[in-house]
Image: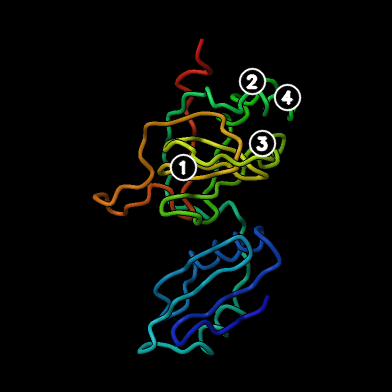
Amino acid sequence: MRLIPYGDAALLVDLDGLDAVLGLSAALENQLPDGVVDVVPAARTVLLRFDRSRTTAAQVASAVRRLTAAPVEQFGAGQVEIPVVYDGADLAEVGRLTGLGVDGVVEAHAGATWTVAFCGFMPGFGYLVGGDPRLRVPRRADPRTRVPAGSVALADRYTGVYPRPAPGGWQLIGRTERPTWDLDADPPALLRPGVRVRFVPMSTRTP
């Protein structure tokens, strides 16, 4: 663990990898250091923003060093269900790459409870982990210039939902009509770090 000052009101915790990030995030949910006002996890780091009128970077760093990583299962902030039509352009290819076939991919993807590990790429895009390890597939060799909003996709250990149209290289396995980013909602992002997600099949594929 490396603790790096990040401006005058934040501390960046650099860790060995995502599992360590999830463990620290779970510990911070159980025991948030005094004065910390925001926790922002990423793939290898956790950013802690603090109120300078209440604490200092040194005090936050000391509190973080005393924390013991909690079980990843304790990292959680509610659960949502996302209905999915499994008819993505890459579904058959993912079935081939994994050896599961189309129906096996759908069963594995919908049969797991996923957890939002962190957010990035664009507002509302969550990187979800915890799925069947057989679903680990590479990104596409030829990224698309436009992925439709609502696309449900896989890449490496992650699954995600595109909140709006954007370029992307993930493998598309389905689509949802449930918005994952809405500025009129509170909070705007449906998929926030710690949220658990179940994908509910509405159809396995179009005829």
In the rendered image, residue 116, in percent from the top left (x then y), is placed at 51, 50
Q: Amino acid at mark 2?
A: Val
Label 2, label 3: how far apart the Cα atoms are = 15 Å
Nearer to us in this view, 65 or 155: 155
Q: Earlier in the sequence, mark 4 or mark 1?
A: 4
Q: Amino acid at mark 4?
A: Arg
Residue denoted by label 4: 96
In the rendered image, residue 48, in percent from the top left (x then y), is placed at 49, 74
Nearer to us in this view, 173 or 193: 173
Label 3, label 4: how far apart the Cα atoms are = 16 Å
- For mark 1, give the secondary structure: loop
- For mark 4, give the secondary structure: helix
Residue denoted by label 2: 102
- Res 132 label: 3
Label 1, label 3: how far apart the Cα atoms are = 20 Å
Q: For residue 4, what is the image quadrant?
A: bottom right
Please state if 135 lies on the left or on the right of 73 as rendered. right
Please state if 185 lies on the left or on the right of 203 as rendered. left
Q: Amino acid at mark 1?
A: Tyr
Badge 3: residue crowd in 10 Å (few <14, some 14–19, many ≥20): some
In the rendered image, residue 99, in percent from the top left (x then y), is placed at 75, 25
Label 4, label 1: how far apart the Cα atoms are = 23 Å
- Res 143 label: none
